[in-house]
């Protein structure tokens, strides 16, 4: 699964992980859906063209042309919007909004097709009415696979088509229309069940993939990305920054005298402190392009692309002010430990390496430790 969802890299340790997984799964459903915008456009254009060609001589042409124009314009607009959304990173705040947009667009599409059943049904002309029914039924069948990637989209699309078509067929009272009208509820129910099953199957597959991905890339204790995620991200950002000739900063940090904390207060307290520090780093890496990770026992890092010295200072200041707030909490029998920081900014080139960047940031951290801890050091510019 190749999701671009930024939340995958930066989960909120304070958020219920089950709820977060559900949101990520919904984002993935939406991504798959919007990635197929071109297929949806082509299916609608083909269906519209077939309907217009078959009924051209049987229904008022002005009405048919207007309907076709609305169908084409609506689907072109939906395709443009779908392409835009497919290229966006779907984070939590956007999932709800785009979910609603998708349902609104699907309902509108269903109503446009459903209006064809009202406008272009030719009573007493079985050849034309059966042709119209065939096109509408084909549209609902074609939509089964694609719209089933969303939990509600399929019924929202199909109901406004099937209902008016069924009513027209019943009202017509011809033998063939009555026979088709009787089959429609069965057909409708079967397709709804099928769509539900496809949705469940895809949802399970997405959840399984997300859980696997989470286990591989997320640190279990703190809920933020682990060393593997950090290394993958740093390498990708290195290549990206080399192409754009923009600076890349790596901040590394280590808790001061953490062994003493564990020895004095026990591992449970130590674990709670690690989680709080992870949360401070996660909040400080607030831009979507940054990544905070736990890269070792009590070691954390933030990868910060395209940021000047003031930006780096602001990130460290944000962590420090959060830490100071926690240190003021007198309700606990322990005071919050201090942190040391080392950072390095380079503009990646062929003559440098991502490993050298890491080494330089680590050397700066060592310098901060040697200078008495609870401080920050920048790397040697060389
Ligand atoms: P320094 O200021 O030089 O960093 O001193 P330090 O005592 O922090 O030394 P160091 O960073 O080498 O020690 C890391 C400690 O982190 C060792 C281990 O007890 C602790 N640690 C590592 N992983 C975990 C963990 O998952 N939970 C807890 N509670 N402690 C951990
Ligand atoms: Mg330490």
Image (cartoon, rainbow, N blue to C red):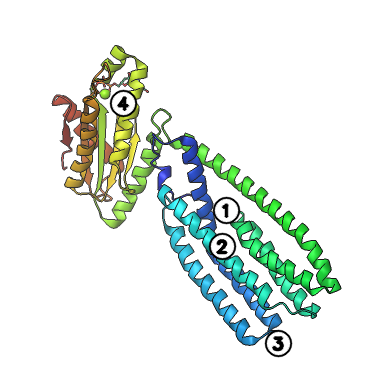
Residue 127 on image: x %, y % = 79, 79
The answer to whether residue 1 is seen in the rendering is no
Q: What kind of element bears circle 2? A: helix
Is the CB–ligand 1 distance for label 4 below 8 Å? yes
Q: Residue at x 53, y 64 (%)?
A: 105
Crowd tier of the residue under label 2, counting other residues whose Cα lies within 10 Å: few below 14, some 14–19, many 20 or above = many
Q: Position of residue 40 (x, y in %)?
A: 58, 65
Outermost residue, right direction?
175
Where is mark 2, residue-wise? Answer: 106
> Which is more toward the observer, 230 or 88?
88
Considering only order in the chain, which callout, 2 or 4, is on the residue closer to the N terminus? 2
Q: Which mark is residue 57?
A: 3
Q: Secondary structure at mark 3?
A: loop
Q: Residue at x 30, y 42 (%)?
A: 285
Q: Earlier in the sequence, mark 1 or mark 4?
A: 1
Q: Where does label 1 land, which residue?
A: 150
Q: Nearer the viewer, mark 1 or mark 2?
A: 2
């Amino acid at each position: 699964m190749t999701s671009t969802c930024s939340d995958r890299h930066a989960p909120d340790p304070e958020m219920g992980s089950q709820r977060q997984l559900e949101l990520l799964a919904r984002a993935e459903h939406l991504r798959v859906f919007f990635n197929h915008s071109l297929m949806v456009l082509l299916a609608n254009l083909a269906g519209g063209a077939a309907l217009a060609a078959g009924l051209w001589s049987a229904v008022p042409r002005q009405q048919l042309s207007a309907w076709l124009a609305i169908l084409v314009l609506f689907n072109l607009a939906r395709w443009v919007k779908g392409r835009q959304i497919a290229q966006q990173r779907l984070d939590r705040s956007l999932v709800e909004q785009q979910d609603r947009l998708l349902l609104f667009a699907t309902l509108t599409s269903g109503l446009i097709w459903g209006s064809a059943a009202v406008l272009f049904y030719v009573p007493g002309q079985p050849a034309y009415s059966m042709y119209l029914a065939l096109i509408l039924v084909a549209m609902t069948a074609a939509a089964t696979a694609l719209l089933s990637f969303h939990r509600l989209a399929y019924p929202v699309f199909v109901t406004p088509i099937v209902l008016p078509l069924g009513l027209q067929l019943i009202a017509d009272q011809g033998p063939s229309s009555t026979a088709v009208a009787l089959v429609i509820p069965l057909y409708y129910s079967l397709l709804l069940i099928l769509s539900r099953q496809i949705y469940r199957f895809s949802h399970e597959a997405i959840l399984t993939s997300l859980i696997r991905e989470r286990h591989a890339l997320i640190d279990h204790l703190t809920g933020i990305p682990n060393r593997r995620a950090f290394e993958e991200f740093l390498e990708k950002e290195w290549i990206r920054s080399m192409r754009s000739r923009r600076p890349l900063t790596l901040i590394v940090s280590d808790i001061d005298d953490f062994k003493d904390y564990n020895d004095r207060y026990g591992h449970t307290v130590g674990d709670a402190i690690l989680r709080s520090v992870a949360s401070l780093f996660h909040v400080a890496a607030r831009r979507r392009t940054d990544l905070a990770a736990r890269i070792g026992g009590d070691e954390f890092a933030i990868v910060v692309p395209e940021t000047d010295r003031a930006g780096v200072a602001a990130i460290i200041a944000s962590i420090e002010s959060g830490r100071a707030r926690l240190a003021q909490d007198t309700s606990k029998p322990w005071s919050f430990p201090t942190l040391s920081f080392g950072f390095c900014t380079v503009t990646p080139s062929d003559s440098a390496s991502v490993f050298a960047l890491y080494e330089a940031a680590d050397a700066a951290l060592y310098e901060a430790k040697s200078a008495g801890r609870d401080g920050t050091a920048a790397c040697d510019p060389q």
